Image (cartoon, grey):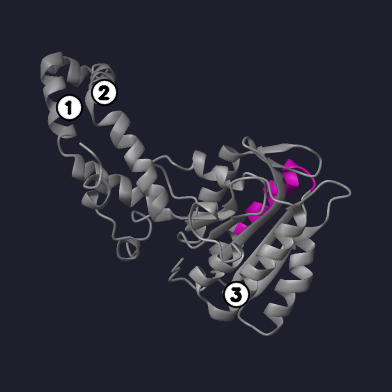
């Protein structure tokens, strides 16, 4: 987790059920406030939304602060499942809804936001982010399975203390996982580059090979033939041109890469994210 970015605010968004251990407030009061008192450049904040409206209002506030130059670690303390986050009033924020809100924050921060999902199955956020769209975060951290509230408090206390002590993300993630590495680690980390690789590999396998490629061509032909100019060319010529265009896969890759990593909005991101077509495609079995 070599961030290359100095994160200068930790936002905790906590929405738990009555009677739950308030792990977010505990992290804020016992860990983050003392760290911020010895680090004047670090801002910390906590919001406790009670329903969908206040949840998304909190995210809009985060977006506004990003537009003013803050680079946040955005930490969610909620219950979770494969379908999404559960708020204190039992309303569900589906993962795709959270993804859409995070994309707006990502754009506001120039892709300088780390998401921490301290919720059971929190890493399932990745499942709805593996598509070739805007990157919703620089990186995401979360558990794959169920975690207990006392484990969350202990593990993330270790994570934040190590991160702001050493400013080394790898050491912080190791502390979060209690020194466990490999597949047995309780918490997982995925960068935006890793996310893009997953998304592009899935796209390549379903749309650039075999039957998937042929179906894609025919779909594009069908759409093109709705245009009178294309219709005048004839279906054979339209199909030939589409095949010719699809043969230039590297150009398509570059367009998707620019959009995903916000290079069309922030050209300097080309230096931050130097991933190439061969980096992804060469290791794949033919």
The answer to whether 19 appears left or right of 234 in the picture is right
The boundaries of the magenta stretch are 50-62
Q: Residue 217: x percent and y percent?
A: 23, 23
27 versus 115 height, above or below: below
Residue found 24% across the figure and 26% down from its top: 213
The answer to whether 150 appears left or right of 261 in the picture is right
Is there any visible trace of residue 234 in the rendered image? no
Q: Earlier in the sequence, mark 2 or mark 1?
A: 2
Q: Nearer the viewer, residue 217 or 118?
A: 118
Q: Nearer the viewer, mark 3 or mark 1?
A: 3
Residue found 50% across the figure and 54% down from its top: 137
> Is residue 56 inside the magenta stretch?
yes
The residue tagged 2 is: 220
Disc 2 crowd, CA 10 A, few/some/many (<14, 14-19, 20+): some
The residue tagged 1 is: 242
Residue at disc 2, secondary structure: helix
């Amino acid at each position: 987790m070599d961030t290359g970015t100095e994160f200068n605010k930790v936002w905790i968004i906590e929405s738990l059920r009555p009677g739950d251990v308030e792990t977010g407030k505990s992290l804020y009061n016992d860990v983050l406030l003392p760290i911020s008192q010895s680090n004047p450049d670090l801002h910390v904040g906590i919001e406790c939304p009670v329903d969908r409206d206040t949840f998304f209002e909190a995210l809009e506030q985060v977006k506004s602060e990003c537009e003013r130059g803050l680079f946040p670690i955005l930490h969610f303390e909620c219950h979770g499942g494969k379908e999404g986050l559960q708020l204190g009033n039992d309303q569900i924020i589906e993962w795709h809804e959270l993804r859409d809100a995070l994309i707006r924050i990502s754009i506001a921060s120039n892709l300088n936001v780390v998401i921490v999902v301290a919720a059971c199955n929190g890493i399932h956020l990745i499942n709805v982010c593996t598509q070739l769209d805007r990157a919703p975060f620089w990186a995401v951290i979360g558990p794959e399975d169920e975690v207990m509230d006392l484990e969350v408090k202990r593990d993330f206390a270790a994570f934040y203390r190590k991160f702001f002590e050493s400013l080394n993300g790898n050491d912080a993630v190791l502390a979060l996982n209690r020194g466990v590495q490999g597949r047995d680690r309780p918490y997982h980390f995925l960068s935006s580059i890793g996310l893009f690789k997953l998304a592009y590999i899935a796209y390549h396998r379903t749309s650039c090979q075999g039957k998937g490629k042929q179906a894609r061509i025919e779909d594009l032909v069908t759409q093109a033939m709705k245009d009178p100019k294309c219709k005048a060319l004839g279906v054979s010529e339209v199909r030939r041109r589409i095949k010719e265009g699809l043969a230039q896969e590297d150009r398509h890759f570059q367009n998707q890469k620019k959009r995903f990593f916000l290079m069309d909005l922030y050209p300097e991101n080309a230096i931050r994210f130097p991933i190439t077509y061969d980096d992804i495609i060469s290791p794949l079995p033919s």
